[in-house]
Image: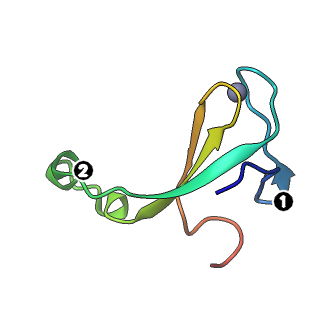
Amino acid sequence: MEATKREVAGRQLVCPFCDHDRFFVRLTLMNTRGATFFGLDWANREADCYICERCGYVYWFMPGYGEPR
Ligand SMILES: [Zn+2]
């Protein structure tokens, strides 16, 4: 998958570490024992990960906020 400019909730994504604006995207399942133990039901879902092409910084966004999917 190619690193491109991304938007989240209508805002351009920019890396807070290196100011780069191109990111890879991955879906990550947030299903962990720890999350279940602490009663975080929302954690057993997929989240969007945006990985900075230049430095590898990872944004992690929970689904269900902002635009409907
Ligand atoms: Zn970066």
The amino acid type, in three-letter code, at marker 1 is: Gly
Mark 1 secondary-structure assignment: loop
Residue at point 73%, 48% (across, down):
3
Packing grade of label 2 (10 A; few <14, some 14-19, many >=20) is some
- Residue at the farthest top position: 17
- Which residue carries the number 2 mark? 35
Vertical relation: 68 (above or below) 16: below
The figure's colour scheme reads rainbow
- Residue at the farthest bottom position: 69
- Which residue carries the number 1 mark? 10
Q: In which quarter of the image is ligand 1?
A: top right
Residue 18 horizontal/vertical position (percent): 76, 21
Residue 4 horizontal/vertical position (percent): 79, 51
Residue 66 horizontal/vertical position (percent): 69, 66
Vertical relation: 66 (above or below) 52: below
The amino acid type, in three-letter code, at marker 2 is: Ala
